[in-house]
């Protein structure tokens, strides 16, 4: 086995050209993000497996037809919370299903089975702390079991938190969290990305967050984008798979893009935002990859933008 390596706070700062707060630096250092490089034989087996899925596999297509699966998954989280669990009960079961992850355009073998979950949360927490720490209301669209939203309270003590999702189970989780006193300035609401609720207005100085949520609507993001343009939140933060931020000449990046296209994940979103920026309608503050991902994709690219007044 190759020598153990560790993802460090300094490495992350260099990749994203950012400066972590002392608290964030401590979280990264304590996360236990150790891993081993793959041997050539292991890497070949990985590549063959991904190619088999791309050529003959049938991963489920993204889209709202998966609502029953989401209801079942978040329903498991709801039952765990009602059984006396804390916020850890809300972690989706899809994390850490496989023993390999992507890091810095390589596939590596984590020491901890929670590597994928930990780095995912660190990225979201950093984005919330950095870009949403001063908004007066934070709306997470596609919040699922609300585990990111509840952690957001660490980084914004006063904001009204609103979790919006397709599923009834998500709203039940939020209601249970409020009843258990996990957060008293929190509410849940039904939301359909494809048919946004025209009665929903966003509070002044509001922030919008999506995390692996827009991926499910493929190329059909325009209704949601128009919803945001009309309501003019102070800032929008997305951590989603973004093809255009990957390198088409890099093998693993190309496989990520091919897998996203096979699933029908989010496509064309960044070029649309860039067009809106050229029209003077929005300002893009950041559009960058984070060099992290799961077994099949680099799925945590970051986009931060604001509608112009």
Image (tube, helix red, strand yellow):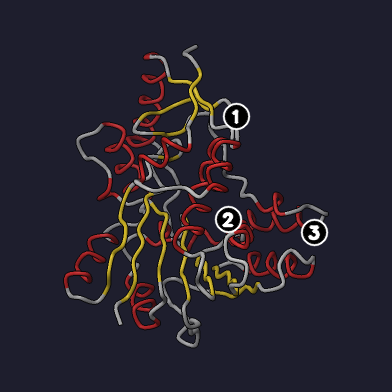
Q: Quadrant of residue 16?
A: top left
Q: Residue 65's spot in the image, x, y percent?
A: 48, 61
In whole angstroms, how far apart are the C-alphas of marks 2 and 1? Answer: 27 Å
Direction right: furthest residue: 84
Q: Residue 23's spot in the image, x, y percent?
A: 57, 48
Q: Nearer the viewer, residue 168 or 241?
A: 241
Q: Who's the residue at 42% across and 52% down the image?
A: 61
Dot 2 alpha-carbon crowd within 10 angstroms: few under 14, some 14 to 19, many 20 or more: few
- The residue where tag 3 is placed is 82
- The residue where tag 1 is placed is 112
N-terminal of the pair, mark 3 or mark 2, is 2
* Element type where label 3 sits in the image: helix
Q: Is residue 198 left or right of residue 305?
A: right
Quadrant placement of the C terminus: bottom left
Q: Who's the residue at 50% across and 11% down the image?
A: 1
Q: Quadrant of residue 227?
A: bottom left
Q: Is residue 107 above or below residue 169?
A: above
Q: Residue 116's spot in the image, x, y percent?
A: 53, 38
In whole angstroms, how far apart are the C-alphas of marks 3 and 2? Answer: 20 Å
Q: Nearer the viewer, residue 292 or 160?
A: 160
- The residue where tag 2 is placed is 69
* Front tag of 2 and 1: 1
Q: Is residue 19 above or below residue 144?
A: above
Q: Residue 278's spot in the image, x, y percent?
A: 17, 70
In whole angstroms, how far apart are the C-alphas of marks 1 and 3? Answer: 28 Å
Q: Is residue 128 above or below residue 236?
A: above
* Element type where label 2 sits in the image: helix
Direction top: furthest residue: 1
* Element type where label 1 sits in the image: loop
* Front tag of 3 and 2: 3
Q: Nearer the viewer, residue 46 or 37?
A: 37
């Amino acid at each position: 086995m190759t020598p153990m390596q560790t993802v460090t706070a300094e490495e992350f700062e260099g990749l994203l050209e950012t400066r972590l707060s002392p608290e964030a630096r401590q979280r990264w250092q304590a996360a236990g993000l150790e891993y081993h490089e793959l041997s050539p034989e292991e890497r070949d087996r990985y590549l063959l497996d991904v190619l088999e899925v791309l050529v003959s596999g049938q991963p489920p297509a993204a889209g709202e037809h998966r609502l029953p699966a989401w209801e079942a998954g978040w329903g498991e989280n709801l039952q765990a919370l009602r059984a006396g669990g804390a916020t850890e009960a809300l972690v989706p079961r899809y994390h850490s299903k496989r023993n390999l992850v992507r890091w810095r355009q390589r596939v590596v073998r984590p020491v901890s089975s929670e590597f994928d979950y930990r780095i995912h949360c660190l990225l979201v927490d950093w984005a919330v702390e950095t870009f949403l720490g001063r908004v007066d209301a934070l709306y997470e669209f596609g919040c699922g079991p609300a585990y990111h939203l509840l952690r957001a309270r660490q980084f914004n003590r006063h904001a009204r938190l609103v979790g919006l999702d397709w599923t009834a189970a998500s709203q039940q989780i939020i209601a249970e969290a409020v009843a258990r006193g996990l957060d008293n300035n929190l509410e849940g609401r039904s939301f359909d990305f494809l048919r946004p609720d025209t009665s929903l207005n966003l509070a002044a100085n509001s922030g919008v967050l999506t995390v692996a949520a827009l991926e499910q609507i493929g190329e059909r993001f325009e209704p949601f984008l128009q919803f945001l343009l009309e309501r003019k939140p102070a800032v929008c933060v997305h951590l989603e798979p973004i093809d255009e931020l990957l390198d088409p000449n890099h093998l693993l990046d190309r496989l990520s893009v091919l897998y996203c296209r096979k699933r029908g994940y989010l496509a064309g979103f960044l070029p649309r935002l860039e067009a809106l920026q050229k029209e003077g309608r929005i300002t893009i503050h950041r559009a960058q990859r984070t060099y992290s991902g799961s077994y099949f994709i680099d799925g945590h690219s970051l986009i931060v933008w604001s509608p112009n007044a």
